[in-house]
Amino acid sequence: MIPDFQSLMRPVLMAAQNEPRKISDVVEEISQHLNLSEEERRRMLPSGKQTLIANRIHWARSYLKQAGLLRNPKRGWFELTERGHQALKQRNVTLDNSYLEQFAEFQDFRSRTKSDEISRTKAPSSEKETNTPDEDLQFAHKRLENALAATLLDNTRRSNPAFFEHLIIDLFLAMGYGGSFEGAGRALGQSGDNGVDGVIDQDPLGLDQIYLQAKRYQANNSVGPSEIRDFFGALSLKKASKGIFVTTSYFTDAAKQTARDLGSRIVLIDGLELSQLMVKYGIGCESKEVLYIKALDDSYFDLD
């Protein structure tokens, strides 16, 4: 289990008790010391840009620095101050935010990072923070996206067949397939053509084509193996090498196994993935607000 960032404060201090350390080396060292599994070491933040363990160690270091227990001798490195060495000697003391609150520098840091609104809604101070600010922000964003995806899927299931076809065209164009809406529309407007609902160009010139099967089903109406076999048969008749089966419901385990047994020629997109792709490519939704998350540029302050 990956500890929260406050629980990592003492290990971060201990890593540099004898000499300055490079933060990337400390991440690896602490991961080994904690016996984290390979899956835990690779677990990412929702953004997919940093591992969870690295993010928590970086924030532990940042808080310790704000309290005057660490300093950065050069970019990407840190070392203990005298205050940090004294803190390590207190072996029976829990190093966390409550401990750091005794230092004026940390109090000032906390006051600068709180607004009146945040302070009013913040949990009681006795409740330990477990997430880093990055985690709180990205998990909140993920929850918003999941709620939006659920709403998009519900609206898609209630749409009429013509609109659903229009939606699929928009999505594939946004993903880089085909050359224009008109071209994609003509390709998809072939419902029931020997078991294939449509064809879409994989490139603007139409040199490579993907055959499509689209089922606008309600949530409880699953796609079974017989429908996968029928689609595979239709692809074989057309001597097609690639097919995509899209549904607004879900594929049974038997259907998924059938697709695997038939080879990698058929890609399955269920309702959940369809809605997530709609969010990712902006189909049926729009950006409400853009937040820019900025980080310190260490190189700007590198005086060496």
Image (cartoon, helix red, strand yellow):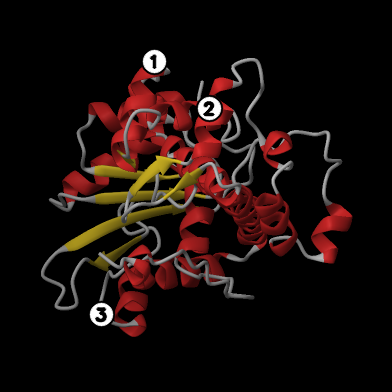
Is 17 positioned to the left or the right of 151 in the image?
Answer: left
Q: Describe the element under mark 1 as helix, strand or loop.
A: loop
Query: Amino acid under label 3?
Result: Gly
Q: Residue at x 22, y 48 (%)?
A: 235
Q: Quadrant of the C terminus?
A: bottom left
* Viewer-closest of 130 and 29: 29
Tell me if mark 3 has few (under 14), some (14-19) or many (20+) residues whose alpha carbon lies within 10 angstroms of its own: some
Query: Amino acid under label 1?
Result: Asn
Give the distance between the C-alpha atoms of the residues marked 3 and 1, in whole angstroms.
51 Å
Q: Nearer the viewer, mark 2 or mark 1?
A: 2
The mark found on residue 159 in the picture is none
Query: Amino acid under label 2?
Result: Arg
Residue 37, percent from left and from top:
37, 19
Query: Residue at the front extreme?
Result: 82
Give the distance between the C-alpha atoms of the residues marked 2 and 3, in whole angstroms.
57 Å
Q: Is residue 189 visible?
A: no
Residue that numbered label 3 is attached to: 179
Give the distance between the C-alpha atoms of the residues marked 2 and 1, in whole angstroms.
17 Å
Give residue 206's quadrant in the image: bottom left
The mark found on residue 35 in the picture is 1
Q: Describe the element under mark 3 as helix, strand or loop.
A: loop
Q: Is residue 21 positioned above or below 276 on the image?
A: above
Q: Residue at x 32, y 26 (%)?
A: 29
Residue 250, percent from left and from top:
52, 38
Q: Residue at x 46, y 64 (%)?
A: 295
| Image mark count | 3
- Circles 2 and 1, Cβ within 8 Å, touching? The answer is no
Residue that numbered label 2 is attached to: 10
Tell me if mark 2 has few (under 14), some (14-19) or many (20+) residues whose alpha carbon lies within 10 angstroms of its own: many
Residue 167, percent from left and from top:
49, 69
